[in-house]
Image (spheres, rainbow, N blue to C red):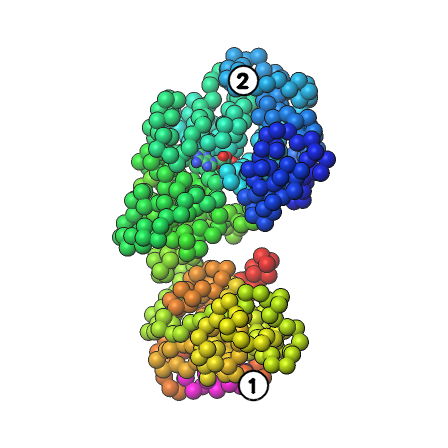
Amino acid sequence: METQGGTVDEAAIKNASKSTLRNWRRLGANPNGRLTKRANKTCSTKRRVPIEYLTNRANVEFIRRFVEFVDANGVPLRDALGALASAILRERRLVDKMNVVDVLNAERFAPVPEVAGWTPPLGETDLLGAAYLAATFEGERNLKGAYYTPRKIAETTTADFDFSGGKTFCDPCCGGGAFLTALKNVDPEQIFGGDFDPIAVFIAKINLLLKFPNRSFAPQVVCWDFLSDGAKEKARAAGFPEKFDFVATNPPWGAATTPCKKRKEQIAEKQTLALEDFATKDAFERFFAKAFDWAKPGAAVRFLLPESVLNVASHRDLRRFLTERVRLERITFRDETFAGVATKCVVVSTRCDSPSETLEVEDAQGVRIATPAPFFATKNRVFSFPTPEDEAILRRVRELGRFDLSESVWALGVVTGNNREILKRVPEKGCEAIYTGKEIEPFVVKPPQFYLRYDRSRLQQVAKEEIYRAPEKLVYRFVSKRLTFAYDASQRLFLNSANMLIPRVPGASVKTVAALLNSELFQFFYSQTFASAKVLKSELSELPLPKIDSTLNRRLERCVAEIVAGSDERVVEINDVIFRFYGLSGAQVRRVREKNAQEIKCVKTRY
Ligand SMILES: C[S@@+](CC[C@H](N)C(=O)[O-])C[C@H]1O[C@@H](n2cnc3c(N)ncnc32)[C@H](O)[C@@H]1O
């Protein structure tokens, strides 16, 4: 057991309960605790106390004690949580209230007197939820998408909801009820929730009982599969309204179903999207689209989503939905990450209404108004949020765009199939140098780190020989937020951390294209337009390249030739010439440099 990473205690493994062993088997560990599928995250038998979910970090010890007790005594987790709930309710003097008794009795827990007799710490926002997550394997949490939202995020996400006039709220996958219990100035009758995990449903109910100690009410939380057709029926049977005024949640971020290719193509062709078009692979997209089935006209729908939703190509359909079908009101960048979930998150605030001309963007610098227009500038509808000043620069680059790289020749580097065996650190007889993405610098290739015997039949994947051996080509780093293109006229080989490009752009030589792509202006354009963590061919192909006259072409070519020969000074000249060509003002040039510098800082802190 650990708090931020690490493994299950070996002693605990010996005393694991039946249900624990069942879980291990399900998740790919054998009964003596040895993982059979360690590599797969959904099979992970690691556990962690969700520190970020706790109000008081000192309570880690209590939670550890709970998990150790469950492991050591073979008590079903469900019953142990029931006993812990009773102990908390007893300490809060609520355990004898009729509505509380009803909730506890409905569950038919087997008694666990030891835990029921404990004195749990009070004041923790969701002690039960934290204990539940801590006792659950990462693999299982991953399958369910069970990463509950820290109180502060749930509070700020819902802070402006006005519950006057009996307005209603629903979290359709409420987990322990982080959103349900974060609401302010609201009656319990106005709060609704559901989850497909019965233990989460129980915990959410207890947390609502604790939130409203002086009210006599039955918590309105049901066990449902929100994505299934049966959810509406369950809601009706439980007396839920058909639609709500507010829907907010942090949905599961894992995979759901993968649509067939044909379906995806049909979606891409359509001008407008309907909800049923949403069958894409990530569960959160389906939750998001489904939420609008449950939202009244004008209702606010807010989701906490991974930041990748803004720019990753696979979420293009969701971005189309956000811009075409609903009113996208605000995107809030949050700095927090959840332990166990690597990505940063954003709150996407929408309304069940027609699309609007502007939206708000909130980040550490404050709130500003943006227009969705730039989203439509790229094929993948990438959500970038340039300021009006930045947008003027981007527009200028687009205005002068006459060509693109779509007609160029593209190729991947070599996949050896067995780097350890095939790559050599020192050149042996008959070996040739092969370069990786790491050796690629702007314009130049650094000395090689590896060599191989270039027998094409032994390599797993190789591009056409004439591409590697082209008289001139560009090679670029693929895993990078920045554009880094080296010029190669030495017919070098590259591994698959580098991609190759033989540009075909009227009027611009290979060297001139290298000058444009490595320039400060194109770096700015690329990162402000696509914001990708990888340099993608599809996005490079969309870069608007200008018509260059022969004088400028010759000048840029000369500069690149000198840089390749070792003179760095020409880099400054290239940038100046390109800025001048686009007619940017001094302030605009400073802005480009400032943004690029920020990007570099950002890349350094993230990786
Ligand atoms: C990321 S957690 C968030 C829980 C809660 N909304 C919060 O913000 O703390 C996602 C929740 O979705 C639930 N869930 C996953 N698939 C579901 C489904 N098909 N229907 C209902 N709930 C589901 C999981 O059990 C888990 O509690």
Q: At label 1, which amino acid type do we have?
A: Ala
Q: Badge 2, how many Cα within 10 Å: few under 14, some, many 20+?
A: few
Report the residue that reaches farthest toward the right.
11
Residue 85: x %, y % from top left: 59, 22
Q: At label 2, which amino acid type do we have?
A: Arg
Name the residue rendered at 48%, 50% in the picture: 307
The one of 147 and 431 positioned closer to us in this rendering: 431
Residue 485: x %, y % from top left: 50, 73
Q: For the magenta stretch, what is the residue range? A: 553-563
Label 2 element class: loop
Q: Is residue 558 magenta?
A: yes
The image quarter containing residue 230 is top left
Name the residue rendered at 37%, 86% in the picture: 550
Q: Between disc 2 and disc 1, whose residue precedes? A: 2
Residue 531: x %, y % from top left: 47, 59
Label placed on residue 512 = none
Label placed on residue 108 = 2
Would you say residue 204 is visible in this rendering? Answer: no
Determine whether, in the image, residue 262 is placed left or right of residue 527. left
Q: Badge 1, how many Cα within 10 Å: few under 14, some, many 20+?
A: few
Name the residue rendered at 66%, 76% in the picture: 426
Name the residue tied to disc 1: 565
Label 1 element class: loop
The one of 247 and 592 positioned closer to us in this rendering: 247
Q: Is residue 578 above or below residue 207?
A: below
